Each structure stands twice: as structure tokens, then as C-alpha cells.
Amino acid sequence: MNEDPERICKPAVFEAIFKKHSKPLRRFIFFKTQDPHFTEDILQDTFVKLWENCDNVTYSKVQSYLFAVANNLFLNSVKHTKVVRTHRKKPTTDRTIESPEFLLIEKEFLEKIEQTIALLPHHQRDVFLLNRIEKRKYKEISELLGISVKAVEKRMHHALKTMKEKIGSV
């Protein structure tokens, strides 16, 4: 065959290249993918790329070009698959697996908690919020509010008792 790169762009030459190289290229790709459908996709994409670049590939370099393109397509696919898997593993804040009913019940429950906390006397509410929201110890709360630890315990007891009566176990 002639070294003229124009010749690859002729349908008859391109078809001859396909017939000559498709079988060994298919085996090469299948060895990598172990998937006949994926193999055919890569094989087809490889020859599409050859056709798109037929002006730039010389006949003597066709075989190495085909194998390089097929290998690159395979590697790009593997990279893409890894990115997709990594993305799926990352938790997202904008997606949730809970049902709409669950989300509505949760929202109503949180509103009920907020309303009940708002109804607590201010000294109980302060102790409750410092302990349950800010995660402070009773000793820290007593120092912060200038009261004894026993007073903090008593206020917390009454706050929890009220919460349990109004909304159930907290």
C-alpha cells in the first residue's frame, strides 16, 4: 500500500484497514475489558477516531495508532468509572434517602421540640440549652450562671420532666 495519508480517508482503504486490524484489536480490547459489549463500543469508537483523523495518520502507523487509541479509550473509561464510584460514595447534603413522609414528621417533631423549649421557664431553658445544645457539663453551667451544681441538676430535671410530658421521651 502507498504511504500517502490521503489514502486512509478513502472508503475502500479504510474498509481494508478495518478488515485487517479489527480482529486483533478486538482481542486486545477484550483482554482488557472482559466485556464483549464494552469491547465493541471501544472498537467502534477507535475506528471513528481513525476516520476523524485519517488525514493525520500515515498508513504505516495505522496499527500503532489504533492500538494506542483503543488503549486510551479503555483507560479513560476506567478513570471515569472510578470518578463515578468516588462521587457516589461521597455523602451529599442536598440529597437524602428519607421519604417525604419521614421528612415531614421530622420537621413537625423539631417544631414541637422548639415550641416546648420556648415554653420552659427561662432558668430551666437556659440550663437545658447549655447542656443539650452546647454540650456543657453541669459544673461549667453552674460556674457560668453563678449557681450550684445541685441547682443545675434540679433545673435540668424539671426541664426534662416538662419535655417528656409535652412531647415524650427526649
Image: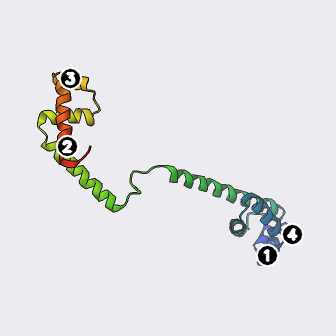
Q: Which residue is mark 3?
A: 149
Sequence order check, earlier mark of 3 and 2: 3
Sequence order check, earlier mark of 4 and 2: 4
The quadrant where residue 162 appears? top left
Badge 4 vs badge 2, beta-carbon distance below 8 Å: no
Gap between marks 3 and 1 measured at Cα: 89 Å
Amino acid marked by disc 2: Met
Amino acid marked by disc 4: Asn
Amino acid marked by disc 1: Glu
Structural crowding at the residue carrying mark 1, measured as other residues with C-alpha within 10 Å and reported as few (<14), some (14–19) or many (≥20): few
Which mark, by number, is residue 15?
Answer: 1
Q: Residue at x 26, y 36 (%)?
A: 132
Local SS, label 1: helix
Q: Which residue is mark 4?
A: 2
The residue at the far right in this view is 1
Tell me residue 168's x, y (percent).
23, 47
Q: Is residue 15 above or below residue 27?
A: below
Sequence order check, earlier mark of 1 and 2: 1
Local SS, label 2: helix
Q: Residue at x 68, y 59 (%)?
A: 73
Structural crowding at the residue carrying mark 3, measured as other residues with C-alpha within 10 Å and reported as few (<14), some (14–19) or many (≥20): some
